[in-house]
Image (tube, rainbow, N blue to C red):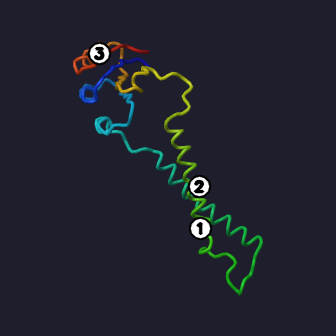
Amino acid sequence: MRGVIGHFREIDTAVDAIEELKHADFGAITVYSPTPRHELEHVLSAPPSAVRRFTLIGGLLGVTFGYWIAIWVSDYWPLVVGGKPIASWVPYTIIGFEVMVLVGALSTVAGMFINSRLPKITHTVGYDGRFSHGDFGVWVECDPEDASKCEDMLRANGASEVRRER
């Protein structure tokens, strides 16, 4: 993976650079930020997170399993009380809800790790420690022949440092 990394001290200059890079269509853009910023989310037009699907599927599986295990236990060890049905959904709602919350929460954490690709075994290309201490980085994946144009575009938008990475 080859590209250019630009180091920005202010978020406004980074946002302007990202907008111009998107219009130039060099390639994939990755932004390094010390904190989540809505300005970066808007300019990148990121799709909704896929973690919510993990939560939904985990919750549905959890509530299904919670009801199933309670009904199975009641049918396996029946307690007949006053002619009431052995398996009734009303008393098992609490068990279904609790298992839904448990499995949904665990699947949300698993989905977060899967989608963020954690743990990272390899070093992230272009990352600099300054991006965790208040500065912003814009990594542009581009062809070697387009790298000089990309560097000029980053410098023109206020990058304090620009370098090529591979």
Q: Which residue is mark 1?
A: 94
Kind of residue at badge 2? Leu
- Residue 95 visible somewhere in the drawing: yes
Give the number of callouts. 3
Q: Which mark is residue 102?
A: 2
Local crowd size for mark 3, using a 10 Å CA cut-off: few (<14), some (14–19), many (≥20) = many
Kind of residue at badge 3? Glu
Residue 73 falls in image quadrant: bottom right
Residue at disc 1, secondary structure:
helix
Residue at the location (71% across, 67% down)?
Answer: 72
Local crowd size for mark 1, using a 10 Å CA cut-off: few (<14), some (14–19), many (≥20) = some
Kind of residue at badge 1? Ile
Residue 154 falls in image quadrant: top left
Residue 134 falls in image quadrant: top left
Q: Marks 1 and 2, Cα distance to the nearest angstrom?
A: 12 Å
- Residue 28 visible somewhere in the drawing: no
Q: Nearer the viewer, mark 3 or mark 2?
A: 2
